[in-house]
Image (tube, rainbow, N blue to C red):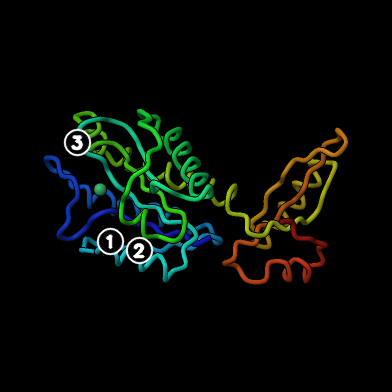
Amino acid sequence: MRIFLDPGHGGRDPGACHKQLKEKDLTLAIALRIRDQLTQHKDIMIKLSRHVDETCSLSDRVLLAERFKADFYLSIHINAGGGTGFESYRYLNTSKKTGDYHQFIHQTICQSLDVTDRGMKKGDFYVLRKTSMPAVLTESLFIDHPLDYVALFKSSMVEKIVAAHVKAIISVKNTLLKPNSIVCGSFKNIILANKRQAELSQHGFDVDIIKANVNGAPFYRVIVYDDGVTPNVEARLNALGYNSFKTS
Ligand SMILES: [Zn+2]
């Protein structure tokens, strides 16, 4: 899965400012930390719109994401102008897919942050309008709200925002982005399914177990994800002697 992370503003555009804090610094710090946290996930490729405090036009951001062939565009912002809590946006008219991504991202982040839920919103933002892939923009806390300002000053809150976004991205990957789920074993016994999962994980595959029911009897399917990034997932499974088949 290819994720394009877009730390809002930068360079000549500081975004919202309040006392000693600038939105552009917070969004960059958050995006860099999200990238660091996701590097351990071999099936996620990350590209950032900027890595330093530099001016980056909105059209350049979109162009970079398109060239990267991102599966998902996530723009990171801090709110201002009266209020507190978390809100997020997608474009006015979007596909159902984008709506699903938005709902997932919003709910996961809101639950993790444990702040006021200001809701899922629609907005006519350039990066949401011009991107061809699903795109969501998050606004975490208000830089000019007294309590949010104090919170944003603390690295613990920045880390909390990072962790919430990381969790949301991983949830999206595991739940919504399954271009090819390959079934590699079905077991009545969960212990055997766990054993298979451990074996495959050791080989570097991205594995999950999905519980299913057939005529009222539970069984456990071991699923390997073909993320479109790692080459030849199915061929590698077969080379290791596993029988597998693709699901739609
Ligand atoms: Zn902003």
Sequence-wise, the earlier of marks 3 and 1 is 1
Label 3 to label 1: alpha-carbon separation = 22 Å
Q: Nearer the viewer, residue 167 or 62?
A: 62
Instruction: Kindly identify the residue that appears in the image at 37 percent across and 42 percent down.
Output: 122
Using the rendered view, name the quadrant where residue 248 is placed.
bottom right
Instruction: Kindly identify the residue that appears in the image at 60 percent across and 67 percent down.
Output: 230
Give neighbour class at mark 3: few <14, some 14-19, many 20+ (Cα, 10 Å).
Answer: few
Q: Nearer the viewer, residue 64 or 26?
A: 64
Residue 81's disc number? 3
Position of 108 with respect to 211 (left or right) is left
Instruction: Kindly identify the residue that appears in the image at 36 percent across and 48 percent down.
Output: 137
SS for dot 3? loop
Q: Nearer the viewer, residue 232 or 190?
A: 232
**In the image as oriented, which residue stretches furthest toward the left?**
19
Sequence-wise, the earlier of marks 3 and 2 is 2
Amino acid type at image mark 2: Val
